[in-house]
Image: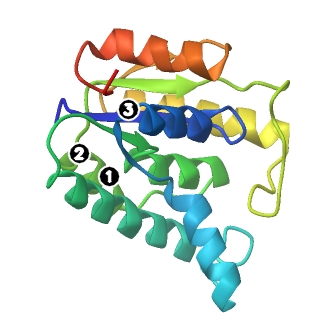
């Protein structure tokens, strides 16, 4: 699906800010699974949290990503995803856990544009919060896990520049060469 564009990387590297900017500029987008799941699980006292039950959290993220993918098929034009199906395998890899075969199959079956944008670790903008409990070292390891898993699944990774959100959005739009925004 050449029209499905993924932005991935470690936490606190500006991915969501970039995706939000692209959406404000008119792009169709899909929200990050992890942060939304954490908010919902905290609100209901659920266990699908990375610090409570990482396996359940991964399965819930996979379900979210598959649903996001299916919803995006109903849209026309390019859709920018804040993470994608392979991120779930990257998360398990980060934890040193085996990646179940069905997650590899999902990453092979639910494909995105061959070029994936990856946000490098950026200490100057990294901040933690109630949902982002990782430290910078874990953010760097997450970045490396995403590099590995996306390359493993045949994607070409393009590092985002460490620049303003406007410059990053321009960088993405220039490389996509399609109607990702209304401007």
User: Nearer the N terminus, badge 1 or badge 3?
Assistant: 1
Between 162 and 97, which is closer to the camera in this rendering? 162
Residue 160 visible, this angle: no
Residue 52 in picture, x, y percent from top left: 72, 78
Where's residue 73, x and y in %?
16, 52
Depicted 149 relative to depicted 170: above or below: below
Image height check: is 26 above or below 32? above
- In the picture, the quarter occupied by the C terminus is top left
Mark identifier at residue 104 = 1
**Residue in the foreground of this view, choosing between 104 and 180:** 180
- Say which of 21 and 73 sits in front: 21
Above or below, 119 against 134 in this view is above
Position of 137 with respect to 74 (left or right) is: right
Residue shown at the point (47%, 37%) measured from the top left:
24
- Disc 2 is placed on an element classified as helix
Q: Quadrant of the N terminus?
A: top left
Asked if residue 37 lies left or right of residue 53, the reply is: left
Q: Residue furthest front?
A: 183
Identify the image quadrant of residue 48.
Answer: bottom right
Q: Which residue is mark 3?
A: 152
Query: What residue is rendered at 30% in x and 17% in y?
Result: 176
Tell me, yes or no, whether the two marked residues, 1 and 3, touch with CB atoms within 8 Å: no
Which residue is denoted by mark 2 in the rendering? 108
Circles 2, 3 touching at the beta carbon (< 8 Å) = no
Secondary structure found at label 1: helix
Residue 60 horizontal/vertical position (percent): 46, 72
Labels 1 & 2 near each other (Cβ < 8 A): yes
Label disc, if present, on residue 48 of the rendered structure? none
């Amino acid at each position: 699906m050449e029209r499905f564009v993924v932005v991935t990387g470690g936490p606190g590297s500006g991915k969501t800010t970039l995706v939000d900017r692209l959406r404000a500029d008119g792009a169709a987008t899909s929200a990050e699974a992890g942060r939304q799941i954490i908010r919902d699980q905290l609100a209901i006292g659920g266990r699908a949290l990375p610090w409570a039950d990482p396996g359940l959290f991964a399965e819930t993220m996979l379900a979210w990503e598959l649903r996001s993918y299916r919803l995006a098929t109903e849209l026309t034009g390019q859709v920018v995803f804040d993470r994608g199906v392979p991120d779930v395998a990257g998360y398990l890899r980060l934890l040193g856990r085996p990646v179940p075969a069905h997650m590899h199959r999902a990453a092979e079956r639910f494909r995105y544009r061959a070029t994936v944008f990856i946000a490098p670790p950026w200490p100057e903008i990294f901040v933690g919060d109630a949902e982002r409990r990782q430290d910078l070292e874990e953010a760097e390891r997450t970045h490396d896990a995403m590099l590995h898993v996306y390359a493993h699944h045949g994607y070409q990774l393009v590092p985002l520049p460490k620049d303003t959100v406007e410059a990053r959005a321009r960088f993405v739009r220039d490389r996509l060469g399609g109607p990702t925004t209304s401007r």
